[in-house]
Amino acid sequence: MSPAPTTKPHRVVADVTARIAERSAATRTAYLARTAEAHEEGPVRRGLACSNLAHGFAAMDGVDKAALRAARAPGVAIVSSYNDMLSAHQPMQEYPAWLKKSVRSAGGVAQFAGGVPAMCDGITQGRAGMELSLFSREVIAMSTAIALSHDMFDASLLLGVCDKIVPGLLIGALSFGHLPALLVPAGPMNSGLPNKEKARVRQLYAEGLATREDLLDAEAASYHSAGTCTFYGTANSNQMVVEVMGLHLPGASFVQPGSALRHALTEEAGRRVVAISRGEEYTPVARILDEKAFVNGVVALLATGGSTNHTMHLVAIAAAAGIQLTWDDFADLSAVVPLLARVYPNGSADINHFHAAGGIQFLVGTLLDAGLLHEDVHTVAGFGLHRYRAEPILSDGELVWRDVPTRSLDEEVLRPAWRPFAADGGLRMVEGNLGRAVVKVSAVAPEHRVVQAPARVFTTQEAFKAAFEAGELDRDVVVVVRQQGPRANGMPELHGLTPALGVLMDRGHAVALLTDGRMSGASGKVPAAIQVTPEAAAGGLIARVADGDVIRLDASSGSLDVLVGDEELARRELVDSPPSEASWTGTGRELFAALRRAVGPADQGASVFGGLTPEHLGVLSGVQGGLPPGQGPGLGPAQHRTPAFTTQEVGQ
């Protein structure tokens, strides 16, 4: 394995990390004090009363029951998003049995502690169910907390892949920050119909030049087997980000399901979580997810042109760890992080091509060498991010790690930091009299990043599609779709707009999208200012934009303005409003009304939980005494012994 690099962090990376730590000092210190109090040496279930403990092992048998009863072995919770309808989660059906076996072999006992819901935005896209999608993250977080709440466990294995699932699992796990947590992915499906061809058929269908059967054939050839979708949306962005943050085993993200290597990595996750659950290698999730880890996650996202959803998810996860991450941090890092990957929709390759070209291991290596990632971080693999430069392989049936080539195997897909596709990251923050928004520019040609055109305002995707089909948008236009924010209707993704907008652009028109909704990782060639904050339902000025108002979006300079006087905007009467409580019903939406009323703005994570504050944590011991960040019982800097992962040995 390559030695730890000696490159100093880039000045901006260091400065952003320092200011995050400074602004988060009170909340992070309070959080670490709370997690330190919760930590106990030895199996936590020893503190349970006999009746409580008996309930905890009543259904067990054999050596596992004896070990749980004697409270001599670490208990490991398995929390899974398995279901057999969704391709990304279907492979996880067998994982609990594999994990229980490997945990047992390492001296622990694993129990399936609970399941969490997993919904697919690909299925609910454009449907009423999509309005529950973002809120499902909070439900997953709460479900994870319920699973871990029994005080039977000393570590957790979190099985999840897509969209809201991974952020929800992590938010829930951070409420138990004293417990080690290791994420176990399932991997992507095999490559199917090329993404570029799929997009072509979608656009033809939008123009009426392809039939529904043609479209369904293309979609079925693209999404065709178990595993995550192969484009670089939120699911694969999740895997990229959490691996670079040190929560996966090195190289685990993009190994395909059904392979012998995936099986071996899953079993190794069970052995590894036992190793970090106690003793010198004790590594709680609160220690891994510090300020440096979040900066590493943002850098990886920017360097690969990842999903815009993470401008909300990473903010919300950080808040659960007592860390205040802001859109300004994303913007400042984006200015210095080069774009190193071209994966659809930012290019024609899919995630399997990225993995074959060198994948996360090459990416980590080149970013470390450029000083754009923090090396000195804790991970589930041991101390130091250099461990993630090595890839897993099977050698004579044994799982080992080896160094990856120091050059990309396909520079049309993945490049070194010194020869990037673009000098800065794939995300931009724009700001002006309409508020703040996010623009994903990695797939937008430079000549299309500045648009000034009259607005056409809609409040539903259906109204937009009707106007397009009627030929009303065949001109330069900024399409405004409002009342789509988290408070309005749960902030659904608006991918249904993309094919028609692409048609307008291909006809030679200047086109942009402005919305308080979201677009995820599938944002394409059309410039889209999304997640506008404040949203229309919260009084944002986007609510006062009228048809014909000239809007200027400049993703290059970072500005977003409606060219109308402030006084005139203020005088305008509001002509639309978010769905009423009575109309926001059906498809289970009425059950989420309380979350809709409580949700915060997009730039604060669109969370119903809010961030941790010193006020509600300050009663804990250690806070008043000025406990330094990273310190406390069981949560100080770990002893950096030689960790488990070497080139030829794992877990020895």
Image (cartoon, grey):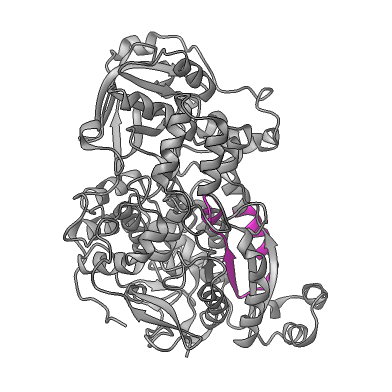
Query: Which of the 4 image quarters holds residue 123?
Result: top right
Query: Is 457 situated left or right of 553 in this image?
Result: right
- Res 594 visible: yes
- Res 316 visible: no
In this view, the residue in front, 153 or 52, is 153
In this view, the residue in front, 259 or 152, is 259
> Does residue 394 sit above or below 123 in this rendering?
below
Could you tell me residue 554's position as x and y percent?
24, 30
- Which quadrant would the N terminus be assigned to in this image? bottom left
Query: Which of the 4 image quarters holds residue 448?
Result: top left
> Does residue 391 sit above or below 446 in this rendering?
below
Which span is picked out in magenta?
141-167
Residue 552 forms part of the magenta stretch = no
Q: Residue at x 36, y 73 (%)?
A: 388
In this view, the residue in front, 106 or 524, is 524
> Does residue 105 sit above or below 616 in this rendering?
below
> Does residue 273 sit above or below 463 in this rendering?
below
Could you tell me residue 616's position as x and y percent?
53, 53
Query: Is 115 situated left or right of 423 in this image?
Result: right
Query: Which of the 4 image quarters holds residue 528?
Result: top left
Residue 150 forms part of the magenta stretch = yes
Could you tell me residue 551's position as x and y percent?
30, 20
Q: How many marks?
A: 0
Could you tell me residue 69's position as x and y percent?
76, 84
